Image (tube, rainbow, N blue to C red):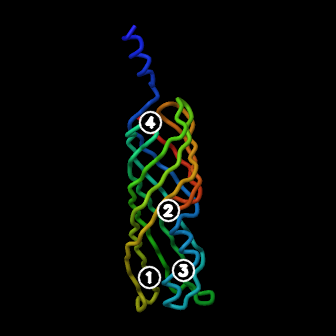
Amino acid sequence: LMTATGALAQDYDYETKHEVAVSIGLFSNSQIIDAFENLSGAIFGAKLEDEQFIGPLSAEYFYHAKKWLSLGGIFVYGHNKQNAMSGNDKIGESKNSYYTLMPAVKFDWLRKKHFGMYSKVAIGATLRSEKYDSNNDSRDYDDSAVHLNWQLSFVGIEAGSPTIRGFAEFGTGEQGIIQAGVRYKF
């Protein structure tokens, strides 16, 4: 009788200890700040056009310390490129790259074999590398700075097999207001 009770207590074949995920998001902190401020344009009096923002692209790892608590880390990359224009002439190019590393905590409030819901909190630092390449080489600019950054995902939803799941998160921060991706649990 005691053997049967012990075996039932461990009947969580979908319970995994590790997970890795990749995702893409929309409207990261860096993307929103770039919409309001661009140092290259302000310094050189250029009008910035043809913005191309890549990311935020994220990779994350979590370890399930308890059924409801996971500890891990998140890496986020973003890149913004714009043409500096004077009238109809291109006079240079502005490029900003963002590299973010954040320790994180994830709270699973529903964890089933094929479905889960959670919230996530992360805080860390972003290295922002800003570069302005002028067509006449007389006004080139290159600078880097580190600043505080975060991710707060109010609601995360995942679904799929016990090991591979698609997910979507809604919140605010460097991974974006909304993000989607794929997660592997092992």
Q: Residue at x 38, y 72 (%)?
A: 146
- Residue 48 in percent (x, y) is at 57, 81
Q: Which amino acid, by three-letter code, is at mark 3?
A: Glu
| Classed neighbour count for the residue bearing mark 1: other residues with Cα under 10 Å, few (<14), some (14–19), many (≥20) | some
- Residue 73 in percent (x, y) is at 38, 52
Label 4 or label 3, whichever comes before in sequence order: 3
Q: Disc 3 marks which residue?
A: 37
Give the Cα distance between marks 4 and 3. 43 Å
| Classed neighbour count for the residue bearing mark 3: other residues with Cα under 10 Å, few (<14), some (14–19), many (≥20) | few
Q: Front-most of 5 and 122?
A: 5
Give the Cα distance between marks 3 and 1. 18 Å
Q: Nearer the viewer, mark 4 or mark 3?
A: 4
- Residue 145 in percent (x, y) is at 38, 76
Q: Disc 1 marks which residue?
A: 133
Q: Which amino acid, by three-letter code, is at mark 4?
A: Lys
Give the Cα distance between marks 2 and 4. 26 Å
Q: Nearer the viewer, mark 3 or mark 1?
A: 3
Q: Nearer the viewer, mark 2 or mark 4?
A: 4
Label 2 or label 4, whichever comes before in sequence order: 4
Q: Disc 2 marks which residue?
A: 174
Q: Are marks 1 and 4 in contact (CB under 8 Å)?
A: no
| Classed neighbour count for the residue bearing mark 4: other residues with Cα under 10 Å, few (<14), some (14–19), many (≥20) | some
